[in-house]
Image (tube, coloured by chain):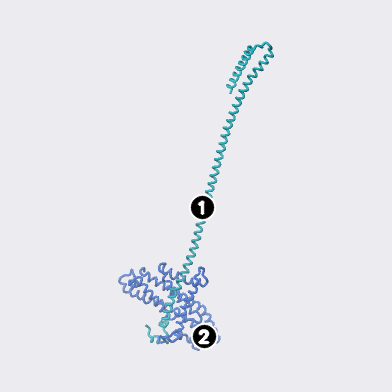
Chain colours: A cyan, B blue
Amino acid sequence: MISASLIQAAEGDANPLLPNPWEALVVILGFLVLLYVVKKWIAPAFEKAYQTRIEAIEGGLNEAEKAKSEAEAMKAEYEKNLGDARAEASRMREEARAEGAQIVAEHKEKAAVEAARITEQAQQQIAAERASAAHSLKAEVGSLATQLASRIVGEALEDDTRSQRVVDRFLADLDADQSAQAGQTGAAQ
Amino acid sequence: MATNEGGFQPPTISETHLPEIFPWMAEWGTGFGKNMLMVILSVIVISWFFMWAIRKQSLVPSRTQFIAESGYGFVRHTLGRDILGEKHFRQWIPLLFAVFFFVLVNNIFGAIPGLQLPTFSHAGPAYALAGIIWIAWIVLGFRTHGPKFIKLMTVPSGVPKWLLPLLVVLEFLSNFIIRPLTHSLRLMAVMLAGHIIVMLAGSGVEFLVAQQGGLDGYGLGALILVGSIPLYFLELIMMVLQAFVFALLTAIYIQGSIEADAH
């Protein structure tokens, strides 16, 4: 403790190292009050503001990050969809081409069958007509020949039996000739 | 100047102690004076400014809030986090903040015309503040390390045994007696010196101009007045620097107390 007499002694040329206890006391009390105020109100307020700002900034950054990743996901999905659509389109094109080819082949086959059928029918018809023509021709030619021969020969050939025999023989010869000719044509084919 | 015939009386240190306002406790020296009023004023100014500046706590700060936050951030990061470390600094921010701004504002009082008296140019306030920090340092040390704290602070490790008796005494003196004294006297001496320079220049000019007069008097007076302008700014730097040094040492002492076993 600094005694009063010491301070009194230093009064003339005050010793700057000797404290004034009054001042020291005021500083101690003042500082403790300030410390209390700072601890109770000032520091928490600043810390809170600081924390809020950090959160706001970090929140903003996180949000931006999230938006970015969302956009990227969307883009990836879009590209995937685009790829799918392209694949789908090419698959459909391929299918259509295959289908078209199949349809063409089917029609070709059908046409061929039809053509074969028509040809066969025509041949049959031709054959039938030819047979009927041959048949009617045979009768007609016989009568015509007979008529012609009777006109040429006259009354000599009145006898029916004889004339019938002559005609038959002529026709048999004709048949023989024709079949020989047909055989030659078949061999040529 | 002192040899001048007019008899210039340079101001003495006693004149830094102004007459008391109230004669309370006058038997202990000076009564309640300007210095004590300024201490109370500083407490009010600091509390009011920071509470007013942060009242809105807006995300985008106003200019006042920005200035206050810069001050708080400076204490928090430069004095707190960088020295005490990420783990411990939070609980010490209020102390460092109060110390720094208390010393700063009280120093700057010395540069404000009308007040013009740095509180810490007197030994009492400097001892008191250093004493508070000294007690906090010791209490913290015992709370962290128990009675081992005395040993950690006085017995240096890795020293030959025969040197220990000498070193223990030296370490004790250095850490427990000299450290708080230098902590307070560094601040007090710088503030006192600055204050005396201002007083000397002021009274010198007053003497030369008002009492001596004449061409020399006015000329020299003007010269001193012009010369005192850079000194004023030098003083301003000193005031801020000493507040920083005082708070920095506070942080270093606390750090030494927390991590006494790491030394």
Q: Which mark is residue A77?
A: 1
In the depicted structure, whether residue A186 falls above or below residue A108: above
Q: Is residue A76 above or below residue A44?
A: above
Secondary structure state at the residue bearing disc 1: helix
Tell me the quarter of the picture where residue A114 sits.
top right
> Residue at the spot x=56%, y=38% of the render?
A103
Q: Is residue B178 left or right of residue A133?
A: left
Q: Which residue is mark 2?
A: B206
Mark 2 lies on a secondary structure that is helix
Give the residue at x 30% y 70%.
B161
Q: Nearer the viewer, mark 2 or mark 1?
A: 1
Q: Quadrant of residue A40?
A: bottom left
> Which of the pair A116/A145 is nearer the observer?
A145
**What residue do we see at 56% from left, 36% from top?**
A106
Chain for mark 2?
Answer: B
In the rendered image, residue A46, in percent from the top left (x then y), is placed at: 47, 71
Answer yes or no: do the residues labelled 2 and 1 have beta carbons within 8 Å?
Answer: no
Q: Given the image, on which type of amino acid does mark 1 rest?
A: Glu
Answer whether residue B123 is visible to the viewer in this image: no
Q: Residue B27 in the image: state x and y as whole percent.
A: 40, 87
Q: Image check: A162 left or right of B26?
A: right
Q: Nearer the viewer, residue A186 or B233?
A: A186
Q: CA distance from mark 2 to mark 1?
A: 87 Å
Q: Which mark is residue B237?
A: none
x, y (%) of residue B76?
45, 70
Residue A185 % position (x, y): 59, 21
User: Residue pushed farthest top?
Assistant: A156
- Quadrant location, the C terminus of chain B: bottom left
Pointers 2 and 1 within a single chain: no
On screen, A10 above or below A186? below
Type of the residue with mark 2: Glu
Which chain is mark 1 on? A
